[in-house]
Image (cartoon, rainbow, N blue to C red):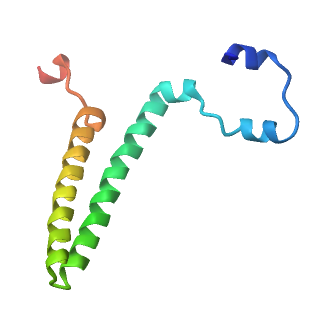
Amino acid sequence: MLSARDRRDRPPEEGAAAVLQGFAVDKTFLSSLKGILLETELDFLRCVSAIIIFLVVSFAAVTSRDGAAIAAFVFGIILVSVFAYDAFKIYRTEMAPRTTQDDQQ
């Protein structure tokens, strides 16, 4: 298996392999501060968009007043609460400004 250093020392490849190489994941970017913030923001947006989608679908399903629709509404509300808790934990641990000893005094 070739390491990143071995790939860097080789000349660039021709054809389709060179085009696909542009889609490789840059692990140095993902481990940098910007990469970590991007990943956290995308995870938070995933939770918020799931909350919105499940709320809309749940309220649309309950309008038919069938037994299965009411069960879908309850299941949707449970999923909304799970995603809301996940978004809260992401915001609290990753995105909220942290207070230090100097800020408290």
Tell me if 74 is positioned left or right of 48 in this view. left
Tell me if 68 is positioned left or right of 15 in this view. left
Q: Which residue appears farthest toward the bottom when viewing the image? A: 64
The answer to which of 30 and 70 lies nearer the viewer is 70
User: Residue at point 86% right, 22% down?
Assistant: 11
Q: Which residue appears farthest toward the left when viewing the image? A: 105
The quarter of the rendered structure image containing the C terminus is top left
The answer to which of 101 and 83 lies nearer the viewer is 83
Residue 18 location in percent, x, y? 80, 36
Q: Which residue appears farthest toward the front when viewing the image? A: 68
Relative to 45, say whether 32 is above or below: above
Residue 103 location in percent, x, y? 18, 23
Tell me if 52 is positioned left or right of 33 in this view. left
Residue 44 location in percent, x, y? 33, 46
The quarter of the rendered structure image containing the N terminus is top right
Relative to 76, say whether 9 is above or below: above
User: Residue at point 79% right, 15% down?
Assistant: 9
Residue 79 location in percent, x, y? 21, 56
User: Residue at point 20% right, 69% down?
Assistant: 72
User: Residue at point 21% right, 58% down?
Assistant: 80
Q: How many marks?
A: 0
Relative to 41, say whether 36 is above or below: above
Write down the quadrant of residue 58 in the picture.
bottom left
